[in-house]
């Protein structure tokens, strides 16, 4: 009898400990670990750039769950922690959508800049070519055949560079549009410089308008 009493006294603390263990403790701890892993997935550049606020809110929620667990509020910790993976996924989705929208806007702006630069370069080439054509028909004094050949050669080089710029624009290389735009702007400056260096032909004077003689008025009788 005494032996049984002693055994009962020995296992009583263990029984009390088991009975006092919070049933939410293990699930809360597991949920907190999952929450920590979820928060780690938010440490990316797109999230930092486009969803820093929502990401911080998830991190704050994780800290709240840990504080609840430390205060033995395992049920409350579980309720907070178990929402963290889903919230983290939402933040990742927001960041991805915002990053895509920003990339599309960047591409649209780059394309618009290319169109403007391309148009300006093409117009500069056409103007220089027209000036060369005029000089070829009516070269001014001092602009001999050698000067014409030199100017035509420079124009041909610039035209060849323009073709290469077009190829760069069509390529799939990173930042191809931006690089082609910069090249087009620089080329337009050089083409205008060539056109400016060419002499200007004097326009033929406009023919004088013939003045009709005034009709004589017969005196009245």
Image: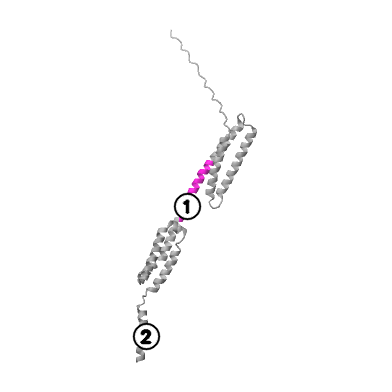
Q: Give residue 131's position: percent from left, percent from top.
A: 57, 34
Element carrying mark 2: helix
Residue 60's place in the image compared with 105, above or below, is below
Q: Is residue 166 left or right of residue 8?
A: right
Tag 2 and tag 1, C-beta contact below 8 Å = no
What's the residue at 35%, 81% (across, down)? 16
Viewer-proximal residue among 175 and 4: 4
Farthest residue to the top: give it: 221
x then y, percent, for residue 20: 35, 78
Q: Which residues are magenta?
A: 99-121
Q: Residue at x 46, y 56 (%)?
A: 99
Q: Position of residue 147 (x, y in %)?
A: 63, 34
Residue 2 visible, this angle: yes
Q: Quadrant of residue 32?
A: bottom left
How far apart in space, not on screen, are marks 2 and 1 (Cα)? 72 Å
Q: Quadrant of the C terminus?
A: top left
Disc 1 on helix, strand or loop? Answer: helix
List the residue tagged with mark 2.
10
Q: Is residue 3 above or below residue 139?
A: below
Mark 1, other Cα within 10 Å: few <14 / some 14–19 / many ≥20: few
Tell which of 123 and 140 is nearer to you: 140
In the image: residue 71, left or right of residue 112: left
Q: Is residue 133 above or below residue 99?
A: above
| In magenta stretch: residue 200 | no
Residue wearing tag 1: 104
Tell me, for residue 214, which label it has, or none.
none
Q: What colour scheme was applied to this rendering of the protein?
A: one colour
Lower position in the chain sequence, tag 2 or tag 1: 2
Q: Is residue 79 visible?
A: no
Chief SS of the magenta region: helix
């Amino acid at each position: 009898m005494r032996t049984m009493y002693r055994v009962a006294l020995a296992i009583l603390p263990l029984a009390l400990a088991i009975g006092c263990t919070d049933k939410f403790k293990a699930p809360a701890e597991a949920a907190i670990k999952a929450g920590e892993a979820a928060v780690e997935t938010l440490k990316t550049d797109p999230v930092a750039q486009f969803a820093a606020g929502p990401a911080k809110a998830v991190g704050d929620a994780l800290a709240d769950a840990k504080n609840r667990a430390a205060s033995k509020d395992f049920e409350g910790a579980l309720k907070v922690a178990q929402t963290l993976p889903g919230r983290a996924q939402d933040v990742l989705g927001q960041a991805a959508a915002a990053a895509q929208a920003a990339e599309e806007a960047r591409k649209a702006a780059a394309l618009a800049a290319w169109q403007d630069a391309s148009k300006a370069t093409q117009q500069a080439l056409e103007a220089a070519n027209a000036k060369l054509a005029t000089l070829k028909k009516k070269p001014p004094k001092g602009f001999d055949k050698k000067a014409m050949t030199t100017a035509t050669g420079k124009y041909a080089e610039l035209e060849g560079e323009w073709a290469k710029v077009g190829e760069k624009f069509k390529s799939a290389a990173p930042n191809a549009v931006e690089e082609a735009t910069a090249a087009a702007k620089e080329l337009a400056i050089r083409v205008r410089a060539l056109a400016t260096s060419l002499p200007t032909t004097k326009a033929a004077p406009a023919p004088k308008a013939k003045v009709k003689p005034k009709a004589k008025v017969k005196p009245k009788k």
